[in-house]
Image (tube, helix red, strand yellow):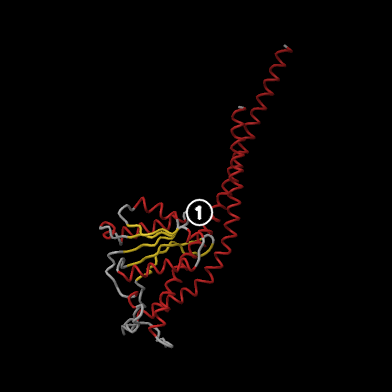
Amino acid sequence: MAANLKEVRNRIKSVISTQQITKAMKMVSAAKLRKAQQAIVQMRPYANRLNVTLSHLLSGGDAVEGLQFGKPTEKKHPLLVVISSDRGLCGAFNANILKLCMASIREQHGPAYEAGNLSLMFIGKKGSDFLRRRLPKAKVIDQYLGAYANPDFDAIAGIADRLMADFSSGTCDQVEIYYSRFKNAGTQFPEREQYLPVSKMPETKGSGASLRADYIFEPNQAELLHELIPSILQTQLFKCLLDTQASEHGSRMTAMDKATENAEEMLGDLRIHYNKARQEAITKELSEIVGGAAALAG
């Protein structure tokens, strides 16, 4: 019985120690979430509007500069950019992104994968660790770990420039980004976004005319588009990274909060078990004393 009580006491100490760690991680994630949420809330409307502008620009046949980014392709050499976290303990955050990626490969990129034409680029460690094992036929063209941990626009712009260069040179004919879209601390959505070629604006029903704006360029259309289109694509990739970071912190905060609650429930059960075992031990000792005293008296 003494050994059993000691084992329960050790388990209680272990759960308390774990609870302190999960509580601290929750507080750290909450602090990081506030900063990350503010960044994506400020960035998203700007990036979304730029994306609409880019679709308008590339929907017009007169957009000479950058038109190659909007031309339809055969999509036989896809490049998938997977944005995931460097660390775990964030619930199903990484699993949801990777599940969406694997489903898309099975449904849409199966022939390209079997032919060895599927390329992967990773921003974050968890996606790399998972997909390298699951997709041995895929070509990994690069992996950026530091870019996720410390997001910097210039560094992300360099990654976007490489994607645009690979697309322009014909190394790949389709670029998709897999990331997590942040809604709130408890809700994140895995997303697949076509990065290149840029999606055109939809056509109106009946007339067949394209829903695009008529922009006035000053001083020169070609010069402006040469600078504007790459800048918009860089901003889109940076937005995806900020979305994923905010989602990670929200998911980790929720997961650690749940882990802390589970530890509290486990502590309650262990303490009840410990008290019952201790009470049984005391009762047994008292019974032995009373029995011994009765035997001596008799």
Residue kind at label 1, given as amino acid type: Cys
Which percent across, then down, holds residue 101?
Answer: 37, 59
The residue furthest top is 298
Label 1: element kind: loop
Residue 200 percent across, percent down from the top left:
35, 76
* Residue at (70% x, 20% y) in the render: 289
Q: Residue visible at 37% across and 52% down?
A: 132
The C terminus: image quadrant: top right
Classed neighbour count for the residue bearing mark 1: other residues with Cα under 10 Å, few (<14), some (14–19), many (≥20): many
Looking at the picture, does residue 272 appear above or below residue 284?
A: below
Q: Name the residue under label 1.
A: 90
Q: In front here: 186 or 194?
A: 194
Query: In the picture, residue 26 is in which quadrant?
Result: bottom right
Q: Which of 78 and 284 is in front in this view?
A: 78
Q: How many marks?
A: 1
Indicate left or right for 285 with 181 as reference: right
Q: Quadrant of the N terminus?
A: top right
Q: In the image, 179: left or right of 294? A: left
* Residue under the image location 35 percent in, 51 percent down: 134
- Whether 183 is drawn above or below 125: the answer is below
Q: In which quarter of the image is residue 72?
A: bottom left
Seen in the picture, residue 152 relative to 26 is either above or below; the reply is below
Question: Is residue 182 or residue 219 the one in the foreground?
Answer: 219
Residue 212 % position (x, y): 38, 83
**Residue 60, percent from left and from top:** 34, 82
Furthest-right residue in this view: 297
Q: Is residue 247 left or right of residue 58?
A: right
